[in-house]
Image (cartoon, rainbow, N blue to C red):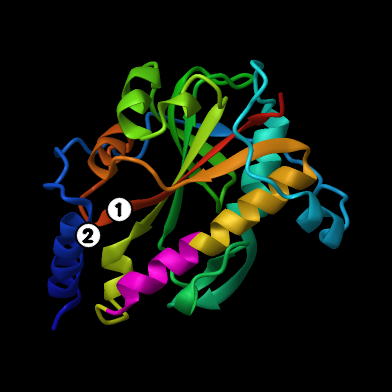
């Protein structure tokens, strides 16, 4: 079975599990402009102490998320750990959140309600260059109200990070069983987000209760790319 056929079967399973039809074809593309994120130092925190402080937060302060804090959260949780020769590329990026086979299948989107130096809208994180690609500058709050099954997150979190996976990339190498593994890969990234957010003194919460089709439409995902998790983040109340 070809990778394309396996991808179609996995998408059929995904839609069945979510009781949804395919999302509208509204792909946002590569972004209208790139916004470099500031260089930041890693947070200084004891690992065991950070694990002990790790919590899911449901209350957030009504204030902007600083660009340096967002930069550090992305860089040290889902950014690039190192570059190596692999897959016929001299400088292939391996992420801080490892994936099975080292595949470049994880994506992180940044849905901004209020953040320093960023207009509200949808951005895609580009880990290899540590930039944000601006996908849209429309107020995302009305769309987020349709995405979150717990709408109380919408007016509270300053930023919502959306994790996605590329099924076409996964199934070019692995069989259909890997549909389960891509969710494990996303789980590793979620744990990174929790730990880095905690080390930075931020409040965060992983949210699996969301409408897949509505989120896919908000992010403008191509069909082989599926959302796996939301992560609400901001300052603690």
Q: Which residue is mark 1?
A: 226
Q: Vertically, is 160 above or below 94?
A: above
Rendered residue at 29%/79% (across/down): 177
Q: Nearer the viewer, residue 158 or 66?
A: 158
Percent of width and height locating residue 186: 47, 60
Rendered residue at 80%/55% (across/down): 52
Q: Nearer the viewer, residue 62 or 162?
A: 62
Proximity of marks 1 and 2: CB atoms separated by less than 8 Å = yes
Rendered residue at 62%/39% (across/down): 204
Q: Residues within 10 Å of mark 2 (few under 14, many from 20)?
A: some
Look at the image and tell me whether residue 88 can be seen: yes
* Secondary structure character of the magenta stretch overall: helix
Magenta-drawn stretch contains 178: yes
Look at the image and tell me whether residue 38 can be seen: no
Percent of width and height locating residue 209: 39, 43
Percent of width and height locating residue 19: 16, 50
Q: Which callout, 1 or 2, points at the residue further toward the start of the chain?
A: 2
The disc placed on residue 14 is: 2
Residue 236 is drawn in which quadrant?
A: top right
Distance of mark 1 from mark 2, alpha carbons?
A: 9 Å
What are the residue bounds of the magenta stretch? Answer: 177-186
Give the left or right position of residue 112, taking residue 220 as reference: right
Give the left or right position of residue 190, taking residue 31 as reference: right
Label 2 residue SS: helix
Label 1 residue SS: strand
Percent of width and height locating residue 123: 45, 33
Residue 224 is drawn in which quadrant?
A: bottom left
Q: Nearer the viewer, residue 185 or 56?
A: 56
Magenta-drawn stretch contains 110: no
Q: Nearer the viewer, residue 1 or 199?
A: 199
Give the left or right position of residue 74, taking residue 226 as reference: right
């Amino acid at each position: 079975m070809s990778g394309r056929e396996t991808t179609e079967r996995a998408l059929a399973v995904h839609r069945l599990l979510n009781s949804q039809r395919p999302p509208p074809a509204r792909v946002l593309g590569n972004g209208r402009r790139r916004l470099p994120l500031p260089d930041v130092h890693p947070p200084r925190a004891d690992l065991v102490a950070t694990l002990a402080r790790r919590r899911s937060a449901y209350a957030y302060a009504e204030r902007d998320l600083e660009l340096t804090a967002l930069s550090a959260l992305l860089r040290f949780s889902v950014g690039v750990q190192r570059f190596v020769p692999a897959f016929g590329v001299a400088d292939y990026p391996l992420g801080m959140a490892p994936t099975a086979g080292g595949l470049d299948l994880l994506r992180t989107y940044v849905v901004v309600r209020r953040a320093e130096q960023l207009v509200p809208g949808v951005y895609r994180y580009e880990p290899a260059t540590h930039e944000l690609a601006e996908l849209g500058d429309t107020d995302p709050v009305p769309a987020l109200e349709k995405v979150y099954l717990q709408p109380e997150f919408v007016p509270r979190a300053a930023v919502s990070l959306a994790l996605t996976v590329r099924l076409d990339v996964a199934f070019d190498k692995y069989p259909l069983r890997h549909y389960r593994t891509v969710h494990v890969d996303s789980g590793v990234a979620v744990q990174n987000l929790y730990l880095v957010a905690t080390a930075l003194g931020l409040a965060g919460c992983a949210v699996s209760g969301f409408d897949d089709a509505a989120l896919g439409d908000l992010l403008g995902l191509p069909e082989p790319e599926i959302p796996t998790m939301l992560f609400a983040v901001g300052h603690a109340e």
